[in-house]
Amino acid sequence: MSDKNPKQSASTQPHVDEQTELATLRQIVFGAAQHDIEVKIAALEKTMMERFAQTNELIASELQKLSTTLQKGLDEAHEQTLAVDKCYDEKTAELNGVTDKLYSELEMSDASHKQENDELHKVLDQAVADLTKKYDAKFSEALTKIEQVTAELSSTKTDRKTLAKLLAAMAVNLETDQQ
């Protein structure tokens, strides 16, 4: 301080004293009120911090409840989806089983009907063959009789009455044979 100008030190000194006096004066006049304000601000800050903490806890609690409810809903939806999938798989398997059974029955029925149709065709073919043979035999027999009658008529001269009787007898024989 020896380097300093005494004038400069004197001018600084009153300024510092004035500030100190001013601070002291302020302390005396406003000190109690300032202290009350600072206490109120501290209390308000403490109250606000407590409220913020409570709000944070409440928000965290509500978020946890919401998360739990959401997870529970998702789990239930997943379980329902699994149940629906299981039911779908069961019904699909059941339908496939029924389809396979019906297909098998249809094949068996088709084979059975084919066999029955084949047998019916054989029976009908046999009946047609038997009827053809029977009518061929009757036709041959009728031709033979006609030839006999023709030969008899050719060898002997018969009158019209005898010829009519012969033809009537042949017609009766033919009708009897057809029945």
Image (spheres, grey):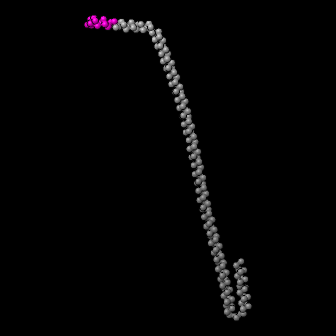
Residue at 29%, 7% (x, y): give it: 8
The overriding secondary structure of the stretch rendered in magenta is helix
10 sits to left or right of 32:
left
Looking at the image, how many numbered discs can be counted on the residues? 0
Quadrant of the rendered image containing residue 71: top right
Which percent across, then down, holds residue 108? 60, 59
Name the one closer to the observer, 85 or 37: 37
110 sits to left or right of 30:
right
Residue 28 in view (yes/no): yes
Q: In the image, is residue 170 above or below residue 39?
A: below
168 sits to left or right of 121:
right
Which percent across, then down, holds residue 120? 63, 68
Residue at 47%, 13% (x, y): give it: 37
Q: Which residues are magenta?
A: 1-14
Residue 1 in view (yes/no): no
Q: In the image, is residue 140 above or below residue 26?
A: below
Which percent across, then down, holds residue 150? 67, 89
